[in-house]
Image (tube, helix red, strand yellow):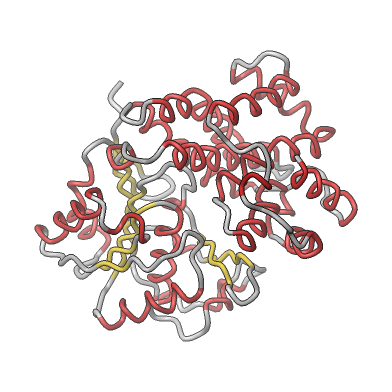
Amino acid sequence: MQLTGNWSYPTAIRFGAGRIAEIGEACAAAGITRPLLVTDRGLADLPVTQGTLDRMEAAGLGRAMFSDVDPNPTGENVDAGLAVYREGGHDGVIAFGGGSGLDLGKVLAFMAGQTRPIWDFEDIGDWWTRADADAIHPIVAVPTTAGTGSEVGRASVITKADTAEKKIIFHPKILPAVVICDPELTVSMPAAITAGTGMDAFAHCLEAYCSPHYHPMSQGIALEGMRLVKEYLPVAYATGSDIEARAHMMSAAMMGATAFQKGLGAIHALSHPIGAQHHTHHGTTNAVVMQPVLRFNESAVRGRLDAAAAYLGIEGGYDGFYAFVGELNDTLGIPKSLAAMGVTNPDTDRLLRDALTDPSTGGNPIEMEEANTRKLLEECLSA
């Protein structure tokens, strides 16, 4: 099977090995003539990034880059990036990298022409309508991991450093105009990042699938996304150069991000404040709390996961699915507990408060209340 194609859902996607060569064409299609490539510090000097800058320069686009981006991007990163963007007279962003580079790049394009502070556009009610839609600059997204799916998302997660809270910044026009999904860009991903980002994709699909909201299209996408992760994440983890596995994982990441408009749940409601306060890797945190959340939701999701297990070729229905998650975590070297990730001396009351106010709570199959969520959080911390 030739794993390549030009897709128009949920945006224009150029999918296939080697397609980073089309970066000039992608910028032209998005109407960008003077892009700023936004990525994180860890990627800035690597060949995968420098090669893209070379291609930009060859296409007459310059080679401007901003890489002062934290693993969990902050409002301070946004301010620094906007200063560079405006001083350089840029007219669009190439959001390049994993979730941090993609999220920050998208927000820079979004905020380029806004006059209100970024926190005025948090994903609450219709706050997104406060933005001047005509002042949002175009975005080309180029993922180099396979997890967040931010390349096809209409939001970015930015940490408000003074309160250690992760905020979801939303606007329909944050969705990139063009995406280049080139699995060759992911082959050098370290195994631990392959694991963590892959489990982020799985968490997106799982929570969307279990969300009680009605969205049959997302339901189907989430189910097939879980199948791709089940089949290909262990392969990509064991053999990073396997281009077929890398390609399928890039698809699964986009599928998870597309599906979770149906809703997320307790996995993300917990991992957002844990990551904001303890600086843990998001996808890996999702993986660590996944089994406790499955137990928490069991009464509401048993039947649904019986059906998912049958589709995924897992024997034993819900129980088999639960065991599979544990086995997959073991295969990928996922830490056994939050403590093993460095979450020590946590402020449980604050984590609880932030989890209950996280937007993801609304998509959980079991209502998250103070008593049951405290118990869940304590199980995750002591696991």
Position of 35 relative to 134 (above/below): above
Residue at 21% across, 39% down: 18
Residue at 81% across, 48% down: 378
Q: Is residue 329 left or right of residue 300?
A: left
Residue 291 in the image, given as x and y percentages of width and height: 71, 35
Q: Is residue 334 left or right of residue 77?
A: right
Residue 68 in the image, given as x and y percentages of width and height: 37, 68
- Which residue is the extreme one toward the bottom? 115
- Which residue is the extreme one toward the right? 371
Residue 83 in the image, given as x and y percentages of width and height: 35, 81
Question: Quadrant where the C terminus lies?
Answer: top right
Question: Quadrant where the N terminus lies?
Answer: top left
Q: Where is residue 36, by image quadrant? A: bottom left
Q: Nearer the viewer, residue 288 or 159?
A: 288
Position of 132 relative to 234 (above/below): below
Residue 328 in the image, given as x and y percentages of width and height: 58, 27
Residue at 49% across, 37% down: 195
Position of 268 relative to 273 (above/below): above
Q: Nearer the viewer, residue 269 or 276?
A: 276
Q: Where is residue 302, by image quadrant? A: top right
